[in-house]
Amino acid sequence: MPDEILTLNDIECRYDERAVVRGLSMRVAPGSIVCLLGPSGCGKTTVLRAIAGFHPLRGGEIRIKSMSVSRPGYLLPPERRHLGVVFQDYALFPYLTVSDNIGFGLRGKTRAQKEAVVRDLLEVVGLSGYGRSYPHELSGGQQQRVALARALAPEPDLVLLDEPFSNLDIDLRERLSGEVRDILKRRHATAVLVTHDQHEAFALGDVVGVMREGRLLQWDTPYNLYHEPNCRFVADFIGQGVFLHGTLLTPDTVETEIGIYKGNRAYPWPKNTPIEVLFRPDDIVPAPESPLKAEVVQKAFKGAEILYTLRLMSGGRVLSLFPSHADHEIGERVGIRVKADHLVAFPLETETPKTAEQIN
């Protein structure tokens, strides 16, 4: 088995003469689920189309199981790439039953073999007993699971998922993303998902790549993207948080309007460099006896927690998660303290994130 199922080497994609993907490289190991995450127009869907064979390359190369499938002047047809694709709109055949939809792509098998594969996949996706139903008789979530089963039926080398949950409501999206991950892992499938929804990416992805303007900024675990962002765009795009102005006192110590803090890394900038320090809601914790006070200006009840927007004495604002029983009124002053195990800072003048070296 190759070390990587999928390899993208410095690919470039264009529409007419406009570059939409530039210098993008990534590697996908067998059995892993990776996500390309970014705002609309960042190029993530174009990357997926290039992997599928629907979009040619202007530069670089795509390899599947060590075989070159795309390079400038060469494009292996999609049907010869041994891929499964789950589309945003499911793309089920309305006149075929669920069983026939799932078995549609099976070639070279006897009827009994096809029926066995379909029966197994119906059980895997939790739709046993729905084989004789038609797509219009199913809910959106059930249709999505049929589309996944159809993609998995031929045992492809790679499954591609194009914003697969965008047509579903939030609760169903969150539940189904966890179910899809479990299904893919049980089948030992390798998958690439594109999405603009970070909750979706984090729920599914072993590794997530954050894209902006056609470039891959950081290729990392969800944990590291949240706690160790490598540029200001990733820090701002992932999770919630606010930046407070500060000063670098030593390579690992910063001063802000809410105190002096020692970080978990050394920064290379000169002493007294003006910086911005990221504080996430879980970095600011309630501390009734603390001398550091802030005024509640907004609150959002989230069940087990309440997300407060707090105004500091300086006028700056931070976000903080309190236990839901700590119900404070707008205008009330509360005590807080900083508990930042991962201190993230960037020079104040940094406006445009730079492309990071990819993690192999």
Image (cartoon, grey):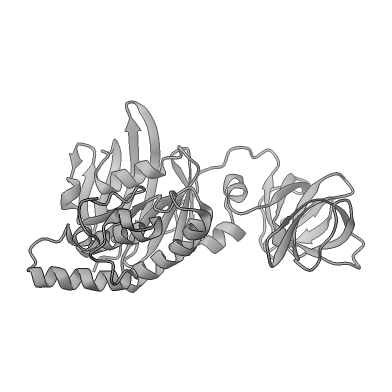
Q: Residue furthest top?
A: 17
Quarter of the image holding residue 224?
Answer: bottom right
Question: Residue at (26%, 48%) from the top-left corner?
Answer: 52
Residue 114 image offset from top left, x and y in percent: 14, 68
Along the line of sight, which residue is nearer the eye, 301 or 297?
301
Rendered position, 183 above or below 267: below
Is residue 43 or residue 341 the one in the foreground? Answer: 43
Residue 357 position within the rendered picture, expressed as x and y whole percent measured from the top left: 47, 51
Q: Is residue 220 visible?
A: no
**Residue 215 appears in the picture as rendered:** yes
Q: How many marks?
A: 0
- Work out whether residue 315 or residue 346 is closer to the camera in this orientation and state it: 315
The residue lying at 30 percent from left, 42 percent from top is: 60
User: Residue 232, position in %: x, y?
Assistant: 61, 46
Picture coordinates of residue 63 (x, y %)?
Answer: 25, 52
In this rendering, the answer to whether 316 lies above or below 32 is above
Nearer to us in this view, 241 or 251:
241
Q: Quadrant of the N terminus?
A: bottom left
Q: Quadrant of the C terminus?
A: bottom left
Q: Is residue 206 left or right of 81 when viewed as pictured? A: right
